Image (tube, grey):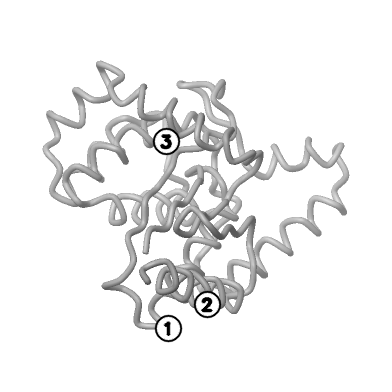
């Protein structure tokens, strides 16, 4: 079963929803039957590649400098995180340009380390305040999971996988995806945003039944 995840590393709801998906997969014992593919969806492609901005400050501005609305948003976010069992230290989160992280994710896929790379980057980003503009930090993660550091450095320096990232964006446009997370199951079913784990388990079962019918 092919499952495509359109997401961005700087998206907290992507982290939460991805976690719920894998919890559902494990709950149904479908680990050996699923192939998860990550699709890059940059929420802010024009983000600075040198400067960072506090996530809390960004939300505060989006809420028109309304402290109450900002606090309500943060409380809801933390509730979703707690429900999924992921650790968030929102005060530490800083937004940066995510393109290099997406490039290295494509490289990690060649090493069959894509899931491992995504998990570590997202965990460090939301719990430790990982700066995605920090090339050394990204290279250290690559080394940690067994990806050649020199190769990873070359990917960033030469801006490789640009075509693949553009293709991911094109596919998102074809599917009329305007926000993430978005999950596509066997090109037939879709889930948008953060949903209860039951939605993921039901969709997995529906997809499995759909595949059986189409094999006949």
Query: Which residue is label 1 attached to?
Result: 27
Q: Is residue 211 left or right of residue 10?
A: left
Q: Nearer the viewer, mark 1 or mark 3?
A: 1
Secondary structure state at the residue bearing disc 1:
helix
Task: Tell me the residue at 59%/67% (across/down).
Answer: 81
Q: Is disc 3 placed on a helix, strand or loop? A: loop
Please report whichever mark, 1 or 3, sits nearer to the chain's N-terminal start: 1
Residue with the mark numbered 2? 201
Q: Nearer the viewer, residue 44 or 199?
A: 199
Query: In which quadrant will I find the N terminus?
Result: bottom left
Q: Residues within 10 Å of mark 2 (few under 14, many from 20)?
A: many
Q: Nearer the viewer, mark 2 or mark 3?
A: 2
- Point out residue 216 in the picture as x, y percentages from the top left corner: 37, 71
Q: Position of residue 91 (x, y in %)?
A: 60, 51
Count of numbered badges drawn on the protein: 3
User: Could you tell me if the residues under marks 2 and 1 are in contact, i.e. CB atoms within 8 Å?
Assistant: yes
Which mark sits nearer the N-terminus, 2 or 3?
3
Label 1 vs label 3: CA separation?
32 Å
Query: Which residue, given by chain and number where applicable, does mark 3 sit on?
Result: 132
């Amino acid at each position: 079963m092919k499952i495509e995840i359109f997401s961005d590393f700087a998206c907290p709801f992507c982290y939460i929803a991805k976690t719920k998906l894998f919890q559902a997969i494990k709950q149904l014992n479908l680990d050996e039957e699923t192939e998860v593919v990550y699709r890059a969806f940059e929420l802010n492609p024009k983000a600075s590649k040198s400067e960072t901005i506090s996530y809390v400050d960004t939300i505060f501005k989006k809420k028109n400098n309304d402290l109450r609305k900002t606090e309500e948003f943060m409380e809801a976010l933390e509730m979703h995180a707690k429900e999924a069992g992921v650790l968030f230290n929102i005060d530490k989160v800083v937004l940066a340009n995510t393109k290099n992280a997406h490039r290295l994710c494509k490289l990690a896929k060649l090493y069959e380390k894509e899931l491992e790379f995504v998990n570590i980057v997202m965990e460090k980003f939301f719990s430790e305040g990982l700066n995605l503009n920090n090339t050394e930090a990204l290279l250290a993660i690559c080394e940690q999971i067994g990806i050649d550091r020199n190769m990873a450095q070359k990917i960033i320096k030469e801006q490789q996988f640009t075509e693949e990232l553009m293709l991911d964006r094109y596919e998102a446009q074809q599917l009329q995806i305007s926000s993430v997370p978005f999950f596509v199951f066997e090109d037939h079913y879709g889930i948008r945003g953060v949903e209860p784990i039951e939605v993921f388990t039901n969709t997995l079962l529906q997809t499995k039944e759909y595949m059986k019918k189409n094999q006949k």
